[in-house]
Image (spheres, rainbow, N blue to C red):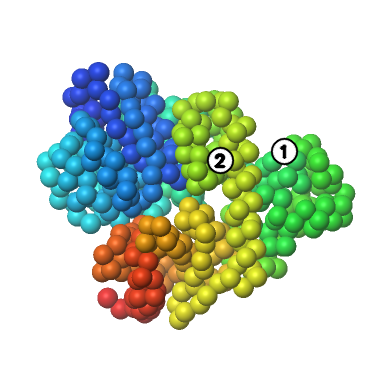
């Protein structure tokens, strides 16, 4: 089945090569870490092949973005990390299109001018084994094998989509193994902690999120004083014994907060660093996510395209982004969560941040028993934007958020879809309560194993 996926990417490469070198190719991708990485891989590969490109990073599912595409004259559009859920809409564009997606798809049948490469239809699990960026990498290397140096960027996308949990596997693992063998990546076993100083690293730590410590300068200073560690010390200057004491304390904090053992097990693990770029993939993915979801999408793409001057600006954007998330998490801890029979939900001000806050809170603020939904009321657009997150334990019990979002949103005339563990939807503003009722009923059926 993987060979069939590779063959499909070869067909996509042939479509690209069939265009005159003077062509400008349209690239449309999602605005999270995976989507931005995917765009970076594609744009770099197209540039190297001699093509001009026009890239746009947008929400998924897209609505207003489609109107922009309809008004353009495009010979070829490549959709990355999106597209399968909007197949009918894309086919209405009437131009040649390539879809590289790992979300749930509606059908494998397409019109002749649309090539849909959805890894799930090739027997590759889009939840864990491939993402938008690694599928884009397969197309890039099909165009030219020398594009294998884009592996760190592709795997940063997979990292941003949390596909490292339980260890990389499938297509992602194949790319990782080759990158390690070819010296493009190196690995180290460490805890996730980065910043200008140890105090800075703890202050802005959101994943992992340490209740009572993250975002709390006074508490951080008190803890570090007990450990005899200077708050201003650089992480690399802290001796091994002091770092071990700090790591033990952080793990204890999470255990005391009732954090799931699956999350705690991921704290001290193998992490991968780009040899040429000099960055940890997880660090890079976090920067991209912050840029994309804090209104600086072009800055994230600039990072992927090798603009080293963009790094300092991206770090500044990330701090502001993390502070907003910390404020949101503290609001949930203060009682901002509503609860139904099988789900929890809260209201957020920003649709880009709502899903992120839900993804963190479901692991560090709530227990494992129910998925968590973020609702953002967009009065100007007469819409409600929904983001939802579950966990692997709930998925094992039958939870499929992507299916639920697609089914209920479609019934209400909206858009929805995603993965079993993470999904989203857009519905009408006056349909919020009906949406919650229908989703609650459907999730109850899923968890009972009812078809």
> What residue do we see at 58% from left, 25% from top?
309
Which residue is outermost to the left?
112
Q: Residues within 10 Å of mark 1 (few under 14, many from 20)?
A: few
Above/below status of 110 relative to 53:
below
Residue nearer the viewer, 9 or 351? 351
Q: Residues within 10 Å of mark 2 (few under 14, many from 20)?
A: many
- What residue is disc 1 on? 196
- Where residue 99 appears, as percent x and y from the top left, is 26, 42
In the rendered image, which residue does mark 2 sit on? 287
Secondary structure type for disc 1:
loop
- Give the left or right position of residue 348, taking residue 236 as reference: left
**Distance (Cα) linking label 2 and label 1:** 15 Å
Task: Locate residue 369, reporting x and y percent.
Answer: 51, 74
Is disc 2 in contact with disc 1, using a CB cutoff of under 8 Å? no
Foreground residue, 9 or 190? 9
Q: Quadrant of residue 10?
A: top left
Tell me the residue at 48%/64% (across/down).
374
Q: State the image quarter where residue 231 is shown.
A: top right
Q: Position of residue 416 (x, y in %)?
A: 32, 60
Of residues 440 and 245, the one nearer the viewer is 440
Quarter of the image where the C terminus is located: bottom left
- The quadrant holding residue 326 is bottom right
Question: Is residue 402 visible to the viewer in this orientation of the structure?
Answer: no
Does residue 270 lie above or below 347 as drawn? above
Earlier-in-chain disc, 2 versus 1:
1
Please tell me which residue is depicted at 24% across the width and 38% down the height of the picture. 71
Tell me if 51 is positioned left or right of 237 in this view: left
Residue 405's disc is: none
On the image, the x and y values in percent for residue 445 come to: 34, 78
Helix, strand or loop for disc 2:
helix
């Amino acid at each position: 089945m993987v060979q069939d996926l590779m063959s499909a990417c070869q067909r996509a490469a042939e479509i690209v090569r069939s265009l005159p070198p003077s062509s400008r190719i349209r690239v449309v991708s999602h605005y999270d870490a995976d989507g931005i990485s995917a765009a970076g891989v594609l744009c770099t590969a197209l540039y190297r092949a001699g093509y001009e490109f026009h890239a746009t990073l947008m929400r998924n599912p897209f609505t207003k973005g489609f109107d922009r595409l309809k008004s353009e004259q495009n010979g070829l559009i490549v959709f990355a990390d999106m597209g399968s859920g909007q197949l009918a809409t894309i086919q209405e564009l009437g131009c040649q299109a390539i879809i590289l997606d790992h979300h749930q798809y509606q059908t494998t049948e397409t019109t002749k001018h649309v090539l849909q490469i959805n890894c799930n239809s090739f027997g590759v699990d889009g939840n864990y084994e491939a993402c938008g960026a690694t599928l884009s990498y397969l197309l890039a290397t099909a165009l030219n094998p020398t594009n294998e140096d884009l592996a760190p960027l592709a795997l940063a996308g997979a990292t941003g989509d949390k596909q490292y949990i339980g260890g990389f596997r499938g297509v992602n693992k194949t790319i990782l193994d080759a990158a390690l063998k070819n010296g493009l990546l190196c690995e180290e076993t460490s805890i996730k902690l980065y910043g200008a100083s140890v105090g800075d690293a703890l202050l802005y730590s959101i994943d992992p999120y340490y209740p009572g410590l993250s975002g709390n300068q006074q508490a951080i200073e008190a803890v570090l004083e007990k450990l005899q560690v200077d708050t201003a010390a650089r992480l690399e200057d802290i001796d091994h014994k002091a770092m071990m004491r700090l790591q033990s304390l952080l793990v204890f904090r999470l255990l005391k907060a009732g954090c799931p053992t699956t999350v705690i097990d991921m704290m001290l693990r193998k992490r991968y660093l780009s040899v040429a770029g000099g960055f940890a993939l997880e660090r890079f993915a976090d920067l991209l996510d912050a840029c994309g979801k804090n209104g600086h999408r072009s800055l994230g793409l600039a990072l992927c395209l090798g603009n080293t001057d963009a790094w300092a600006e991206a770090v500044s954007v990330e701090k502001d982004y993390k502070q907003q998330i910390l404020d949101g998490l503290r609001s949930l801890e203060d009682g901002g969560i509503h609860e139904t029979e099988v789900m929890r939900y809260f209201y957020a001000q920003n649709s880009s941040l709502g899903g992120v806050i839900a993804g963190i809170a479901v692991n560090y603020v709530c227990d494992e028993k129910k998925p968590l939904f973020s609702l953002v009321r967009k009065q100007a657009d007469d819409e409600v934007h929904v983001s939802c997150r579950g966990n692997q334990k709930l998925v094992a019990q039958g939870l499929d958020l992507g299916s639920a979002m697609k089914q209920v949103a479609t019934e209400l005339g909206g858009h929805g879809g995603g993965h079993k563990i993470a999904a989203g939807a857009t519905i009408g503003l006056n349909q919020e309560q009906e949406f919650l009722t229908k989703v609650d009923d459907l999730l109850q059926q899923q968890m009972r194993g009812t078809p």
